[in-house]
Image (spheres, rainbow, N blue to C red):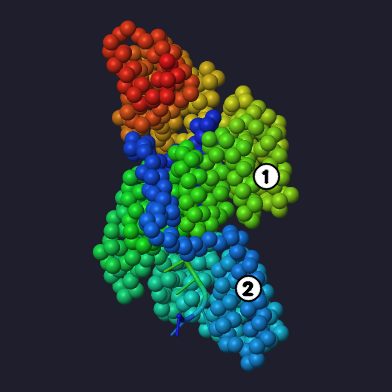
Amino acid sequence: MSSRRKRIYFSSIIGPRIAYCNNWLLKGTSKSPSLLVKVNHPSCFLFVLIRSLSNTTENPTPPQGREPKPEALPKQPCNLGPNHLHSALISFNRMLRMRPLPPISQFNKVLGSILKMGHYVTALSLIQNKLQQFQGIQVNICTFSIAINCYCHLDRVDFGLSLLGTLFKRGYTPDVTTFTTLINGLILQDKTPLAVELFKKLMRTREIEPDVVMYGTIVNALCRTGNTIRAVSLLRIMEEGSCKPNTVVYTTVIDSLCKDRMVDDALKLFSTMDEKGIFPNVVTYTSLIHGLCNFGQWKEATEMFKEMLDSGIAPNVHTYSVLLDACTKEGKMKEAKGVLEVMIQRGVDPDLVTYSTLMDGYCLQGQMDEAIRVLNTMVERGLRPNVFSYNILINGYCKKMKIDEAMHLFQELPRRGLKPDNGTFNAMLWGLFQTGRCGAAQKLFNDMQAAGINLDSCTYGILLDGLCKNGHISEALSLFHRMESNGLFLDIVKYNILIDAFWKDKQLDTARAIFSNLSSKGLQPDVKTYTIMIQGLCEEGLLHEAKELFVKMEQNGCLADDVTYNTIIRGFIGQHKRYEALILVEEMVQRGFSADASNSSLIIDILSTKGQDPALQEVIKKFMSKDSHKMKEIE
DNA sequence: CTAGGGTTAG
């Protein structure tokens, strides 16, 4: 199974996004920000701050009568990577020709920088071919550690381990760094149990005295496997012991707490750092800003950003990408572009992730032309889009039902040397099903299996939903039963799909029965389950029951979301209960949600009749003041 | 200054 990090990744890129417009059913349940906090909508705090950054720091108004100071602009071309490698290689080769030869430490320095640039194969080949074979230079344990690290980053931790054997045989003694490298390599390849075993063995035999980096690596292992609480315990143990945690260890735990939706605990730990005199760095701030943005806590995020700047810590490409992402998630594309401009102005080069984030934002807005434009900009700037970048676009096209364009990109992948992954196939499958091309979907699903692509929970959700939506309920059911007998992915999402399908198929009793039996399966209805039930009831004209369930869901601790409100409001309008509908509209707007497209026009219809009821007039006024542009539409 | 290892974004 994949690590927690990967799960979050997929659920955030493909899962919820696929569902965003048309298929809200499949949307992930627990990872989306709590809707309560959305009440303080204005994410503009951030944008104002970012804007002010560009105005005050980069373009100061020159004081009268003085020359504007020439700025020491660290503007760099963005594709320095290969050039850096080039110069590293030149100095390496120069060193090889020097007599006497420089000490091994000098070679290791250059190798280390090549490793940091990510040119693992190059570093390995330099060690093997240049140092050892021809020159007979005596490598040392640092060189071995570098080589092991290269193997780990190439997903060959097994080679790393055998290199450990080799160095033992040749009489070298691995040190704490060598072992930390290996432990981390195991973690990176989701072999955390092995990593922990190795760590424990080292502790038992007292071969190695662990240092803060080794502890930090283990803390990271715990965090990545969802054991954040245990990571916190280890942090506490370190605090008591002689090996005190440093900024990295704290940051690792803080980030993990944020990802586990425990932002408050993260903030508490953050303040502990202060008390202990451990300084947060750019990673610490970026993790916290990210966590706060994810939960719509714009004000707090802005304060954190300000605090970071006040401490003299410069935002880096990660920080800006987080801010840009926050803008796009709010649909504030102008501001997102603003972030991009500011970062470039301040000499921070946007990278693959930054541009992909921006592309994703445009896709979310349905502005595919803009998204493609970003792709081109990215290529012009020397960045090579990867499979994730393409997944974003394919997904964007599928959402717009432009399946031919999506298919075109899909077929483009191999030509660009890219291999479609789980996310690519899921996006395509969804698109094919939604455009009614079940045969093509079936074929693609076969291809997917033939290619050995991992089928995840999301894949099964797309299949179930696709079959149901295209009228193949019995096939969906047999798939469901196969999943049941294999014990696979039967979460609330899958039940939601079925319940919805049965309502749509007018099998009301079956839908109700599945709903009432959820708890016997150990499942809790989520906001979507309730909304599906409410929608079904509304469509059957059972408004009273729908309203009851609407009340009951919140009593059960499940808050209604924008879709729930829009669903029940549509139900009331459909039964000509205008007054009650508008009361709900008001409640919805107060909670920070707004009417969807179909409801907007219905509500405008009601308002344009300008009902005579004075109570209704009051409600209308409140609604109108929140949405002035809609008022214009009416007049 | 003092090689090599751990933390962040799509």
Query: Marks 2 and 1: which is nearer the front?
Result: 2
Q: Which residue is mark 2?
A: A87
Q: CA distance from mark 2 to mark 1?
A: 44 Å
Residue A449 marker: 1
Task: Tell me if I can see residue A234 in this picture.
Answer: no
Relative height, residue A123 to residue A312 (above, below): below
Relative height, residue A198 to residue A507 (above, below): below
Return the x and y of residue A240 as percentages of the image width and height.
Answer: 28, 70
SS category of the residue bearing label 2: helix
Q: In which quadrant will I find the C terminus of chain A?
A: top left
Front-most of residues A173 and A600: A600
Left or right, A323 with respect to A153, comes to left
Residue at (46, 77) in percent of width and height = A176
Residue at (64, 79) in percent of width and height = A92
Residue at (55, 78) in percent of width and height = A109
- The numbered mark, 2 or 1, whose residue comes first in the sequence reads 2
SS category of the residue bearing label 1: helix
Front-most of residues A67 and A216: A67
Which amino acid type corresponds to the residue marked 1 in the rendered image?
Gln
Q: Looking at the image, how many numbered discs can be counted on the residues? A: 2
Badge 1 local density, few (<14 within 10 Å), some, or many (20+)?
A: few
Return the x and y of residue A446 as percentages of the image width and height.
Answer: 70, 40
Q: Chain of mark 1?
A: A
Q: Chain of mark 2?
A: A
Residue at (34, 30) in percent of width and height = A591
Left or right, A256 with respect to A132, comes to left
Relative height, residue A571 to residue A234 (above, below): above
